[in-house]
Image (tube, grey):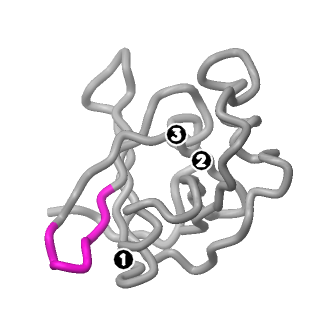
């Protein structure tokens, strides 16, 4: 049985702030569970991720804000973190600052697709 806690333990936050991709599960408007591989971040006790404005993920999260995020350590598959919660805020990614931060972490360079507006999901 999973242990329910209100905060990610300090010894696991590196999984949310490192360069391992997250598995983000949303509920579609039809009620299906869909998991997306996504870049994630963690700040101020919240998990953050983003997508382009108008994406299926954004539509799903607006219809039902429940979400689950999991990340497994690349070097030790028995070390993992799973967060279940709700999207509590959706905000614009002004000047693509958030996606650039994540892109630098995951790829070493700024995000390449500069023509799409993006939004940040705060979980």
Q: Residue at x 51, y 65 (%)?
A: 54
Would you identify the image quadrant in which residue 85 lies?
Answer: bottom left
Dot 2 or dot 3: first in sequence order is 2
Q: Is residue 26 above or below residue 118?
A: below
Would you identify the image quadrant in which residue 69 lies?
Answer: bottom left
Range of the magenta residues?
25-32
Q: CA distance from mark 2 to mark 3?
A: 20 Å
55 with respect to 77 (left or right): right
Q: Is residue 70 above or below residue 83?
A: above
- Does residue 27 belong to the magenta stretch? yes
Q: Which mark is residue 10?
A: 2
Would you identify the image quadrant in which residue 119 lies?
Answer: bottom right
Q: Residues within 10 Å of mark 1 (few under 14, many from 20)?
A: some
Instruction: Provide residue 89's location: percent of width, then percent of height.
Output: 63, 77
User: Which image quadrant: the N terminus?
Assistant: bottom left
Classified by dominant secondary structure, the portion drawn in magenta counts as loop
| Numbered marks: total | 3
Dot 1 or dot 2: first in sequence order is 2
Q: Residues within 10 Å of mark 2 (few under 14, many from 20)?
A: few
User: Which residue is denoted by mark 3 in the rendering?
Assistant: 39
Q: Nearer the viewer, residue 72 or 112?
A: 112
User: Which image quadrant: the C terminus?
Assistant: bottom right
- Does residue 70 belong to the magenta stretch? no
Q: Nearer the viewer, residue 59 or 88?
A: 59
Q: Is residue 90 above or below residue 121?
A: below
**Residue furthest right as drawn:** 95
Instruction: Provide residue 107's location: percent of width, then percent of height.
Output: 62, 18
User: Which residue is denoted by mark 1 in the rendering?
Assistant: 66
Q: Nearer the viewer, residue 18 or 93?
A: 93
Q: CA distance from mark 3 to mark 1?
A: 18 Å
């Amino acid at each position: 049985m999973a242990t329910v806690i209100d905060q990610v333990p300090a010894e696991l936050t590196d999984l949310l702030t490192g360069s391992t991709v997250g598995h983000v599960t949303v509920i579609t408007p039809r009620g299906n569970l869909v998991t997306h591989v996504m870049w994630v971040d963690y700040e101020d006790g919240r998990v953050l991720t983003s997508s382009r404005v108008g994406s299926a993920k954004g539509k799903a999260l607006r219809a039902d804000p429940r979400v689950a995020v999991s990340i497994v350590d690349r070097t030790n598959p028995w070390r993992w973190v799973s967060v279940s919660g709700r999207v509590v805020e959706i905000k614009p990614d002004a000047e693509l600052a958030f996606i650039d931060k994540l892109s630098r972490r995951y790829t070493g360079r700024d995000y390449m697709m500069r023509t799409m507006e993006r939004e940040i999901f705060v979980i």
